[in-house]
Image (cartoon, grey):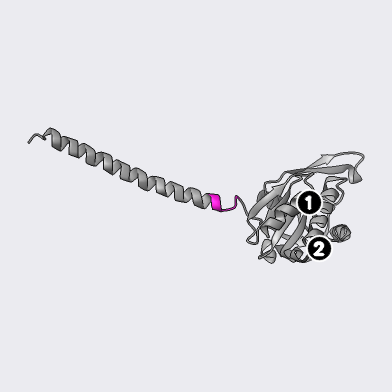
Amino acid sequence: MSLTSAQKFLWVLAGVAALAFVWLLLWSDYRADSARTDAEPPFFAEFELTDHQGMVRTEKDFAGRWMLVFFGFTNCPDVCPTTLSEVAAVMDGLGDDAAKVQPIFITIDPERDTPAALAEYVPLFDAGIIGLTGTPEQIAATSETFPIFFERVEEAAAPDGYTMGHTSHLFLFDPDAGFADSWPYGTSAEEIFADLEERI
């Protein structure tokens, strides 16, 4: 039985409508997935390290608080003390809101930065900073959960004959340990404070 032109047209129309319906379903799924991806942090803070008082700490210990996290080492000549001084100024500026934020200094030089070494170093900045260290394996594992880079650099004039090259960003994590923001080295305490104050 042959189809009339009208019937052929209706079949084509039905096919186009079906394709359009499938496309709309796929597009809505894509948009939903995209929205979920945009809403989720690109990564979370994850670590299990020893603090400068000898206690094992994980990101769960700071649940409900914002975390300011910086990676460095105690023999760092300029970047680390400058950044930690900026963090101290930010914490001081927060006043009562400082209780909502935990600054954390994670060493990338565990060979020298023992809990005892960190216990002498982090209080110098008087900002409630917690220093974290661990075995080389623990530090390496921690660095894999953050977008950071570090390496040992042989340098005869440096203490013990070497220094460390490393990422110098200051990271901010939300109360669920999700990445919220970061600031490059050289960002002023005023700018960091303004950004942080808006969030908390």
Q: Amino acid at mark 2?
A: Gly
Residue 49: x %, y % from top left: 73, 60
Quarter of the image that includes the C terminus: bottom right
From the image, tell me which residue sits under label 1.
Answer: 190
Q: Who is closer to the viewer here, 175 or 133? A: 175
The answer to whether residue 92 is seen in the rendering is yes
Task: Compute the Cα span from label 1 to label 2.
Answer: 19 Å
Q: Answer left or right for 33 relative to 84.
A: left
First in sequence: mark 1 vs mark 2:
2
40 left or right, relative to 26: right
- Report crowding for label 1: few under 14, some 14 to 19, many 20 or more residues within 10 A (C-alpha): few
- Name the mark on residue 58: none
Residue type beneath disc 1: Glu
Name the residue tied to disc 2: 128
Q: Secondary structure at mark 1?
A: helix
Q: Nearer the viewer, residue 118 or 91?
A: 91
Question: Which x, y percent locates residue 199?
Answer: 67, 57
